[in-house]
C-alpha cells in the first residue's frame, strides 16, 4: 500500500514502511464485505 501524503510504501501485514523508508504505521482490523472496506478504529 502506498501513502499518497507521505509517499511511503507500507507492508500491510506488518505495518512497516518498506525500504528506503523507515518507520511503522498503526494497523487496524479490517475486512472487505460487499465491495466495501470496513475498518475497526
Image (cartoon, rainbow, N blue to C red):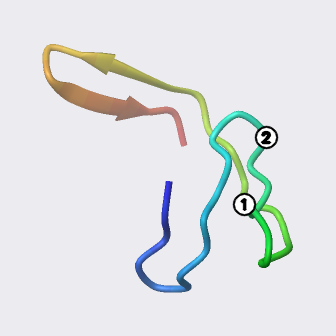
The residues tagged by marks 2 and 1 sit, at their Cα atoms, a distance apart of 9 Å
Q: Earlier in the sequence, mark 2 or mark 1?
A: 2
| Residue 14: image tag | 2
Q: Is residue 6 above or below residue 22?
A: below
- The residue sitting at the front extreme is 20
Q: Give the crowd class for mark 2: few <14, some 14-19, many >=20 residues within 10 Å.
A: few
Q: Is residue 7 above or below residue 11?
A: below
Left or right for 21, reference 8: right
- The residue sitting at the top extreme is 34
Q: Give the crowd class for mark 1: few <14, some 14-19, many >=20 residues within 10 Å.
A: some
Residue 26, position in %: x, y? 72, 54
Q: Residue at x 85, y 71 (%)?
A: 23
Residue 8, position in %: x, y? 61, 74
Marks 2,1: beta carbons within 8 A: no
Q: Is residue 18 above or below residue 37?
A: below
Q: Is residue 21 above or below residue 18?
A: below
Residue 10, position in %: x, y? 64, 57
Q: Secondary structure at mark 2?
A: loop
Q: Secondary structure at mark 1?
A: loop
Q: Residue at x 30, y 32 (%)?
A: 37
Q: Quadrant of residue 4?
A: bottom left
Residue under pointer 1: 25
Left or right for 30, reference 15: left
Residue 12, position in %: x, y? 63, 41
Q: Residue at x 14, y 14 (%)?
A: 34
Image quarter of the C terminus: top right
Left or right for 20, reference 37: right
| Residue 5: image tag | none
Left or right for 12, reference 3: right
Amino acid at each position: 500500500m502506498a501513502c499518497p501524503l507521505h509517499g511511503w510504501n507500507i507492508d500491510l501485514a506488518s505495518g512497516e514502511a518498506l525500504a528506503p523508508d523507515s518507520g511503522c504505521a498503526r494497523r487496524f482490523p479490517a475486512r472487505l464485505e460487499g465491495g466495501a472496506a470496513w475498518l475497526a478504529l
